[in-house]
Image: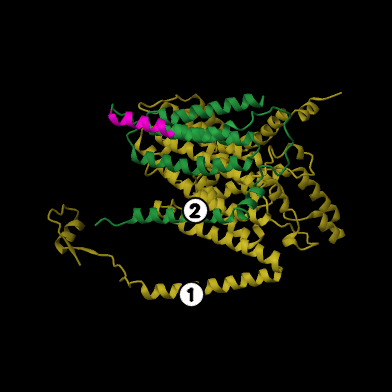
Chain colours: A yellow, B green
Amino acid sequence: MKSVWDWILDHQLALAIVKAIVWILPIFVVMPLTIWLERRLLGWMQDRLGPNRVGPFGLLQPVADGAKLFFKEEILPKGIDLLSYILAPAIMLIPPLTIGAVVPFAAPNSPLAILTPVSDINVGVLYVMAMSSIGAYGLVLAGYSGNNKYSLMGGLRASAQLISYELAMGTSIACVAMAVGTLKVSSIVSAQQTSFYGIPNVWIHNWTIFSPFGFLAFVIFLICMVAETNRPPFDLPEAENELVAGYHTEYSSMKFASFYMGEYLGMLVFGTVLASLFLGGYDFLPIDWKMMALHNSGTAPFANFMERITIDFGPVFLLAKAVGLVVFYIWIRATLPRLRYDQLMNLGWKVLLPAATGNLILISAWIVTTTQYGVGAGWGLVFAVFVIAAIVVTLYRRQKKQTSPQFEARTIRMVQLKPHVEEAVDQGSDPTNAEVVPS
Amino acid sequence: MNLLVFAVLASAAVLAALGVILSKSAIRSALSLVLNFMLLAILYFTLHSETLGVLQVVVYTGAIMVLFLFVIMLLSTQGNINLTESRDVKKIVGGLAGISLAALIGVQIYLPLASVPAPQFHAPQPIGPSYGAPEPLGLALFTRYGYPFETVSLLLMIGIVGSIMLAKRRVR
């Protein structure tokens, strides 16, 4: 007798739909929790309470907010470009809902393996880049359609920012793809389950973040990810003290809610992408439990138990990593002030992009030397590069010290009032002819 | 079924392309071009060349068109600017020139196409797993077409340097 499940397995389209639902639903369940988490954590970091009235610990606050937004009046301002006004919030939801298609959430030997990833295309990483770049249209169109100066400026800033940071992000992804030798996300994840640095019989997994190149790529990717999701300190498109609310100034009710939702979904989904590329994906800890049990028979029961858990609860660990990254986002938001526009551009073009490109060149040089001349030559190369970099930096500093003009330390010009005016001020009367004498 | 998918996608792409030249606001034109590029990418996907399709989205839809929109929004903050022109002799002359150019190119394209046999519909060939994968593309680019590839990158570099020269020139 054929069950429904067999029928689904026989039909590709049905299986794809089930896979997509299985991927999207948990993200939608966790999303309100992250909103609650952000508000509570921000409250805690800023020494206030945060929402604590609706439900236990305020847990139902996102639900209440959602209901409120749902029943709010839908305001269509005058003079808008209706088509793009309606399209923009929908486009904002495209990247978070589509990027996950290439991210695997369970190990190939787990019972959930058949459900993941939704589509294991061999250009997976490029697909992530492509879909995340589509999100820019949401911001740009929202800014343009609102018929509002501030919206427009938000849209302009968004397009410039997203394009600038996409480059560094793509380059840092290219580093990972080059080191692993594939663009498939599932292969990148499974390459991180091998032993540490390729040394045999070590029970540590080779997560990308453990290699120096991988760590640099990770840092660059993390910064670019914050910029791509328009989170503080990169939230210039919606800088509320300059642009009211930036690109979504003219939106209300559920259209605003979809911007809001898109932001949090995007954070979570980008978190899963980052976890898959750098943090071992669905792997719980970077430990090969089987190898550990072999090495030390005393730990065997514990190791076997952990092995079972790691395989069976892969999706939970992936989501947990994503939520951990969201916590990191919130932490940055509470810590750092917003960047100025020129700082943003300088960081993107003059720091992150050269760093990522240098990293890429180094990785390719490492790969070529190790495959041609062995690992020893690779380490020799690293040493040589380090020495050359040190010399260049020293020379550059010396040069800069000699050529840069010696500015005088700028002094603060104190302002001194005439004695009789000061007296008048002290006595509280009106100093009508208060002249200011620079000292 | 395949023909139906192709017909829908291709006609939508043609409509989007028409929208680029027929719509009156610059933003709408740019958005039609975006739609056209997306549909082209989907057409590539239906031909199993995933790399080409994704690169189409990354490069054209994701980067170039966003820059286009950026420039258009920067220049025309008043919203819809009327792009229609008044009647002019130049229109007629330009139309004639355009038709003759189209005829010239059309003859060039038609003659080779006429010798191509009509497509035979038979069972689709099974394609290998590496078809449309990035590896063969990269190998071809870096071995067989290495010289033109590097030349093009040099050309682009010159273009970038030149545009910076033009943009940074001090007005005296």
Q: CA distance from mark 1 to mark 2?
A: 33 Å
Comparing B111 with A244, the one in front is B111
Please indicate whether residue B86 sits to the left or right of residue A293 in the image.
Answer: left
Q: Which mark is residue A64?
A: none
Residue at 68% across, 54% down: A181
Tell whether position B95 is magenta.
yes
The correct choice, above or below, for B74 with respect to A89 in the image is: below
Instruction: Pick out the residue farthest to the left.
Output: A433
- Give a yes or no on whether discs 1 and 2 share a subunit: yes
Q: Earlier in the sequence, mark 1 or mark 2?
A: 2
Q: Nearer the viewer, residue B42 or A312?
A: B42
- Vertical arrangement, residue B100 with respect to residue A196, above or below: above
Marked residue chain, label 1: A
Magenta stretch bounds:
B88-101
Chain ID, mark 2:
A
The number of callouts visible is 2
Regarding residue B31, the answer to whether it shows in the image is: no
Mark 1 — residue?
Answer: A394
Query: In terms of depth relative to the viewer, which is nearer, A24 or A118?
Result: A118
Classify mark 2: helix, strand or loop: helix
Residue A258 in percent (x, y) is at: 52, 32
Disc 2 marks which amino acid? Thr
* Residue B104 percent across, percent down from the top left: 45, 34
Residue B25 within the magenta-colored segment of the rendering: no
Task: Determine the residue positioned at 77% across, 44% down.
Answer: A108
* Residue situated in front as seen by the camera: A73 or B114: B114
* Residue B75 rendering spot, x and y as whole percentages: 34, 40
